[in-house]
Image (cartoon, grey):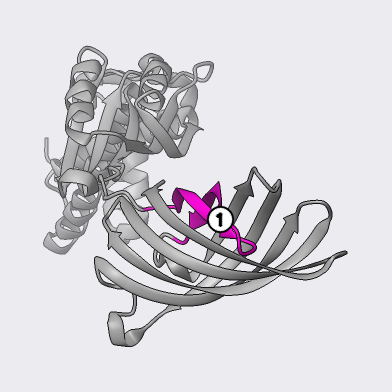
């Protein structure tokens, strides 16, 4: 039936401007839809929130009483070995979710990986505990957002847009509008279709985030401690000692020294014991090498000259001072042999006395 043969009220309505004509036509179409349901399957009032009882197409229930949560997390972990950890992670997540993104950069001690995991929400605590056990957690953050109201609002908006689009389609199919009016109505219908597509995409995306928790994981391989050549802390030397205190035969004793590992003669601590005279020496010594004879850098025959200060005990207590000459006969990476002669003065209750010491240091590195 064409609108030209419509009753008088409708013909009067069509003479009105388009901005008033569309609302009146919508009311008339709604009234017609109450008696002829096949003409307008979407007739009736816009969809209200209480009419949406669930989320169709998967995901959690989105009724007014239900709750829907979006769970997202980030972790940064330092692991011992990257490749075995990635293999174990892909095996562990099977049956619990999926790896949607995996990027590996570098190799060896500087390798790193970035992954995005989608897992069932109930499986997330177990996955987090498994990841913590793989290495050192540098950063961890898990957040939850309740989105049931947002899903509900999307559903209501979608239903209302679909209802309005269906009514406009019925209205334009009556073939009673001018060309410019038809173009305006079709423009409005196109806007509604785009709005419906946009809402449906956003709804499906949000439902996917509700159905599976998202976890962004960064893995970095700890730098391995590379083996290096050992370095000497100090040289420890044991030696036989000969002491001359008078015109008689020299007295034989023993001693122990600690030497500077970089240049043994430049600093050393000496302990000497002479059992016959019951004398004990504890001294600090420093010597210098000659630049004319290699400055102590050669592996053999490094001459040096220096001084020493310290303490000596026999029948009493004595202050010790003196100097000496020496030569490193051999110096290896882990040992050296040093020959030295020293003249020491002892100042105590008996006045000033002189002692000449000769020693052969046999040192090994520590």
Q: Position of residue 142 (x, y in %)?
A: 47, 33
Depth check: give the residue in front, 279 or 167. Answer: 279
Residue range highlighted in magenta? 232-260
Q: Position of residue 95 (x, y in %)?
A: 22, 12
Q: Secondary structure at mark 1?
A: loop
Q: Foreground residue, 96 or 230? A: 230
What residue appears at the point 46 percent right and 27 percent down from the top-left corner? 148
Q: Magenta span: helix, strand or loop, mainly?
A: strand
Residue 13 lies, in percent from the top left, at 32, 50
Crowdedness near tag 1: few (<14), some (14–19) or many (≥20) residues, C-alpha within 10 Å: few
Viewer-proximal residue among 88 and 260? 260
Residue beneath disc 1? 249
Q: Give the residue furthest to the front.
A: 248
Q: Is residue 30 left or right of residue 278?
A: left
User: Picture quarter containing residue 327?
Assistant: bottom left
Q: Residue 136 lies in what quarter of the image? A: top left
Query: Is 242 contained in the magenta span?
Result: yes
Q: Is residue 105 left or right of residue 327?
A: left
Query: Which residue is more in the foreground, 5 or 126?
Result: 126
Q: Residue at x 51, y 52 (%)?
A: 241
Position of residue 349 in the picture relative to residue 41 (left or right)? right
State whether residue 32 appears in this view.
no
Q: Is residue 250 left or right of residue 198?
A: right
Whether residue 59 appears in this view of the structure is yes
């Amino acid at each position: 039936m064409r609108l030209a043969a419509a009753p008088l009220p409708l013909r009067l309505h069509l003479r009105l401007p388009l901005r008033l004509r569309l609302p009146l036509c919508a009311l008339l179409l709604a009234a017609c839809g109450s008696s002829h349901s096949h003409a307008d399957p979407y007739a009736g009032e816009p969809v209200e929130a209480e009419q949406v009882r669930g989320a169709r197409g998967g995901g959690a229930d989105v009724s007014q009483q239900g709750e829907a949560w979006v769970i997202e997390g980030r972790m940064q972990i330092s692991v011992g070995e990257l490749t075995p950890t990635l293999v174990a992670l892909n095996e562990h997540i099977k049956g619990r979710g999926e790896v949607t993104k995996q990027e590996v950069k570098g190799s060896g001690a500087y390798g790193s990986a970035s992954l995005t995991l989608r897992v069932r929400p109930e499986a997330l605590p177990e996955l987090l505990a498994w990841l913590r056990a793989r290495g050192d957690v540098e950063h961890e953050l898990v957040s939850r957002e309740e989105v049931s109201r947002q899903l509900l609002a999307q559903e209501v908006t979608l239903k209302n847009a679909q209802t309005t689009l269906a009514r406009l389609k019925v209205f334009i199919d009556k073939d009673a509008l001018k060309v410019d009016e038809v173009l305006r109505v079709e423009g409005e219908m196109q806007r509604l279709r785009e709005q419906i597509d946009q809402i449906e995409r956003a709804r499906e995306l949000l439902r996917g985030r509700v159905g599976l928790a998202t976890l962004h994981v960064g893995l970095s391989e700890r730098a391995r401690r590379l083996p290096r050549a050992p370095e000497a802390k100090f040289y420890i030397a044991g030696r036989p000692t000969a002491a001359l205190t008078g015109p008689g035969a020299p007295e034989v004793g023993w001693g122990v020294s600690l030497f500077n590992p970089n240049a043994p003669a430049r600093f050393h601590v000496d302990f000497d014991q002479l059992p016959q005279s019951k004398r004990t020496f504890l001294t600090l010594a420093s010597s210098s090498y000659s630049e004319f004879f290699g400055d102590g850098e050669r592996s053999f025959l490094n001459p040096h000259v220096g001084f020493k200060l310290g303490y000596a005990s026999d029948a009493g207590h004595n202050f010790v001072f003196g100097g000496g000459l020496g030569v490193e006969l051999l110096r290896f990476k882990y040992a050296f042999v040093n020959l030295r002669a020293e003249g020491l003065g002892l100042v105590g209750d008996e006045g000033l006395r002189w002692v000449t010491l000769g020693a052969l240091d046999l040192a090994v590195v520590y």
